[in-house]
Amino acid sequence: MKILLTGGKGQLGRDCFEVLQEKHEVIGTGLSDLDITDLRAVSEAVREHSPDFVLNCAAFTQVDACETEREAAFQVNAVGPGNLARAVEQSGSWLVHVSTDYVFDGHKAPPQPYLEDDATGPVSYYGRTKLAGELAIQNTTHRYMIVRTAWLYGRHGKNFLKTILRLALANPTKPIKVVHDQFGSLTWSYRLAQQLAALLDAGGQGIYHATAEGYCTWYEAAAYFLARLGVSSQVIPCTTAEYPTVAVRPINSILENRRLKEAGLNLMGHWQRDLEEFVTRHGDVLLREARAIV
Ligand SMILES: NC(=O)c1ccc[n+]([C@@H]2O[C@H](COP(=O)([O-])OP(=O)(O)OC[C@H]3O[C@@H](n4cnc5c(N)ncnc54)[C@H](OP(=O)(O)O)[C@@H]3O)[C@@H](O)[C@H]2O)c1
């Protein structure tokens, strides 16, 4: 199959390129090659390459910055997916679009998970723009798969775990407060890339959840990661109220991969097992990179 990948230089995009090019022809594009907010450029790229699938990993992902850079966030997260949907509708290809747990309000009592057809109700501007992107796609084409994921970490780009590692190495005796009352599904971007590849191969339609099995808090994720790396640190749990951020985050955004399971396609592993494998594969380079910065 031929796949046009947008946002291919991001954390998930790079893992998707690596995984998908093993079996498919992948045209990887980053922002400098294809800006998804540019309808004409998007339409031309889809016409030129005539892919079977467009896989959109492009997004404005800085949750706090979305609160202040609202127009930019809306363009990338809502207008962009709408442009891609128009292009696939014209060309007859399919759109696979990555969305987020932050489309939910988080009011379910943990550990109750959110299912694909649960009511949405974003509590941040990021979540609102990502939901607007989902709706723009659904209102434009039926040839789509929207894959909601959560709490991503991976080898490439920036993520929460890399930040924690840098803080721990910078000052091992200084306490690092990490929120222990938000619950979510910590997900390895490489595993998600494998899941997306399986979904593309099998085909499907509609909304899917694709996150690691199990759930944790940010504190539990940070403590487990540093322990696996053998980095001693002073990670201490705190409440959301003690660690205020510009954007509000849902208290519970645990997702259940119900539709993947029903289709016999769920490849996602338990978050602790995936984090162990991530550390086994990339621990040395992560430590080297973090030490070079501090
Ligand atoms: N990260 C998470 O924790 C998380 C959680 C849930 C869902 N998701 C979703 O997962 C997907 C992938 O996230 P990620 O972690 O890989 O994010 P990422 O590392 O920030 O990658 C996003 C990529 O999109 C690019 N981009 C921004 N504006 C663009 C535009 N107008 N046209 C084309 N490309 C553009 C960015 O380029 P620049 O870097 O040059 O701006 C970046 O390379 C996103 O849809 C995100 O909403 C992420």
Image (cartoon, grey):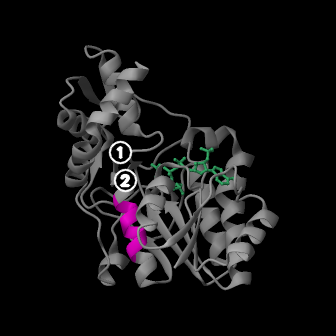
- Inspect the image, locate mark 1, and give the three-letter code of the amino acid beneath it: Gln
Residue at 27% in and 58% down:
111
Q: Quadrant of residue 29?
A: bottom right
> Where residue 244 sits in the image (x, y, percent)?
47, 31
Residue at 26% in and 27% down:
235
Q: Nearer the viewer, residue 109 or 217?
A: 217
Say if disc 2 is inside 8 Å of ligand 1.
no
> Where residue 252 sits in the image (x, y, percent)?
37, 53
Q: Quadrant of residue 23?
A: bottom left
Numbered circle sitting on residue 122? none
Q: Can residue 167 be seen at all in this image of the molecule?
A: yes
The answer to whether mark 1 and mark 2 are in CB contact below 8 A is yes
Numbered circle sitting on residue 252? 2
Q: Is residue 93 left or right of residue 243?
A: right
Magenta-tinted stretch: 191-198
- Inspect the image, locate mark 2, and give the three-letter code of the amino acid beneath it: Asn
Q: Is residue 140 left or right of residue 207?
A: right
Location of the C terminus by quadrant is top left
Q: Is residue 197 magenta?
A: yes
> Where residue 128 sits in the image (x, y, percent)?
61, 56
Residue at 35% in and 30% down:
164
Q: Nearer the viewer, residue 56 or 114?
A: 56
Look at the picture and state if 202 lies above or below 175: below
Give the overall secondary structure of the magenta segment: helix
Label 2 environment density (alpha carbons within 10 Å; few <14, some 14–19, many ≥20):
many
Look at the picture and state if 126 lies above or below 39: above
How far apart marks 1 and 2 lie (CA) works out to: 6 Å
Q: Which residue is mark 1?
A: 182
Q: Can residue 209 be seen at all in this image of the molecule?
A: no
